[in-house]
Image (cartoon, rainbow, N blue to C red):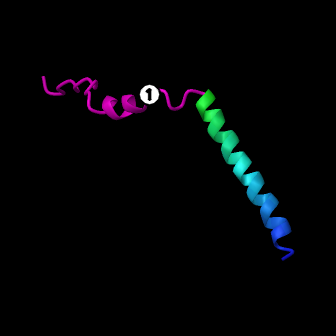
Amino acid sequence: MSDFFYLIPISIVLGLIGLLVFLWTLRDSQYDDLDGASERILYDEDRPRPDPRP
């Protein structure tokens, strides 16, 4: 029973840390463009290598 006196505050503190990190990512605009990264990989913007043979 005395373990609960340690586990409950630890779980509340970890939950609050997780909530604060989530709110920080919302404020930092981490979730604004969810589709952009998944579509950006489809576009080939790399330049081709020049032919080393003359």
Relative placement, left or right, of 32 versus 23 is left
The residue lying furthest to the bottom in this view is: 1
Tell me what residue is drawn at x 82 percent, y 73 percent: 3
Relative placement, left or right, of 38 versus 23 is left
User: Where does the image place residue 6, in percent across and percent down from the top left?
Assistant: 83, 66
Secondary structure at badge 1 equals loop
Q: Please tell me whether residue 53 is drawn above or below residue 23 in the rendered image.
A: above
* Quadrant of residue 48 within the rendered picture: top left
Q: Please tell me whether residue 15 is drawn above or below residue 33 in the rendered image.
A: below
Tell me what residue is drawn at x 35 percent, y 35 percent: 38
Near-viewer residue (21 or 19):
19
- Quarter of the image that includes the N terminus: bottom right
User: Where does the image place residue 45, in percent across and percent down from the top left?
Assistant: 28, 24
The question of residue 29 being in magenta is answered with: yes
Near-viewer residue (38 or 52):
38
Instruction: Judge the density around disc 1: few (<14), some (14-19), many (≥20) Cα neighbours within 10 Å.
Output: few
Tell me what residue is drawn at x 79 percent, y 62 percent: 8
User: Where does the image place residue 35, in percent across and percent down from the top left?
Assistant: 37, 31
The question of residue 52 being in magenta is answered with: yes
Highlighted range, magenta: 28-54
Q: Please tell me whether residue 2 is drawn above or below residue 25 in the rendered image.
A: below
User: Where does the image place residue 15, in percent across and percent down from the top left?
Assistant: 70, 51
Residue type highlighted by circle 1: Asp
Examine the residues drawn in magenta and state their main secondary structure.
loop
- Quarter of the image that includes the C terminus: top left
* Quadrant of residue 49 within the rendered picture: top left
* Quadrant of residue 28 within the rendered picture: top right
Q: Please tell me whether residue 3 is drawn above or below residue 31 in the rendered image.
A: below
Residue marked by disc 1 = 33
